[in-house]
Amino acid sequence: MTRAAAATKPPEAAEEEPDTNLVLDAITFTRLRETKNKVVYEEELGRQSDPAVVGTLYVSKHAVEALGDPDVLMVQIAAG
């Protein structure tokens, strides 16, 4: 097949569309430490064998203070 023919070849079967209504369960984060401008939270894992979804979350001190300076954050992730 020539390069021109390869460039104009129609795409193969289209990939399946992702589910845009997908929502993960709330993820819990516990305060780990503070840096100069951020508060660092670490994801709590249900079981040690479970893979982390996010891992470490860095949140600005300004936002943490606006939330009442919590030791625990709950985060929900949705596709959209």
Image: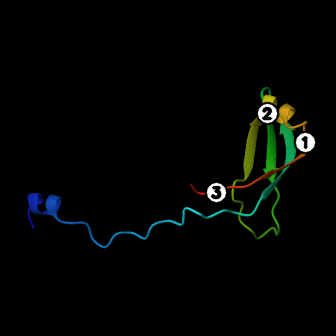
- Cα gap from disc 2 to disc 3, whole angstroms: 21 Å
Tag 2, which secondary structure? Answer: helix
| N-terminal label among 3 and 1 | 1
Please tell me the numbered disc located at residue 78: 3
> At label 1, which amino acid type do we have?
Pro
In the depicted structure, whether residue 55 falls above or below residue 62: below
Screen quadrant of the N terminus: bottom left
Q: Is residue 38 left or right of residue 77?
A: right
Q: Are marks 2 and 1 in contact (CB under 8 Å)?
A: no
Q: Are marks 2 and 3 in contact (CB under 8 Å)?
A: no
> Which quadrant holds residue 49?
bottom right
Q: Disc 3 or disc 1, which is closer to the eye?
A: 3
Q: Residue at x 55, y 62 (%)?
A: 20
- Cα gap from disc 3 to disc 1, whole angstroms: 23 Å
Location of residue 31 in the rendering, given as x and y in whole percent from the top left corner? 87, 44
> At label 2, which amino acid type do we have?
Ala
> At label 3, which amino acid type do we have?
Ala
Location of residue 42 in the rendering, given as x and y in whole percent from the top left corner? 80, 50
Location of residue 37 in the rendering, given as x and y in whole percent from the top left corner? 77, 27
Please tell me the numbered disc located at residue 70: 1
Tag 3, which secondary structure? Answer: loop
Check disc 2 and report the residue beneath it.
63
Q: Residue at x 90, y 42 (%)?
A: 70
Q: Is residue 74 left or right of residue 53?
A: right
Mark 1 neighbour density, 10 Å: few (under 14) some (14–19) many (20 or more): few
Mark 3 neighbour density, 10 Å: few (under 14) some (14–19) many (20 or more): few
Mark 2 neighbour density, 10 Å: few (under 14) some (14–19) many (20 or more): few
- Cα gap from disc 2 to disc 1, whole angstroms: 11 Å
Tag 1, which secondary structure? Answer: loop
In the depicted structure, whether residue 62 falls above or below residue 59: above
| N-terminal label among 2 and 1 | 2
Location of residue 66 in the rendering, given as x and y in whole percent from the top left corner? 84, 32
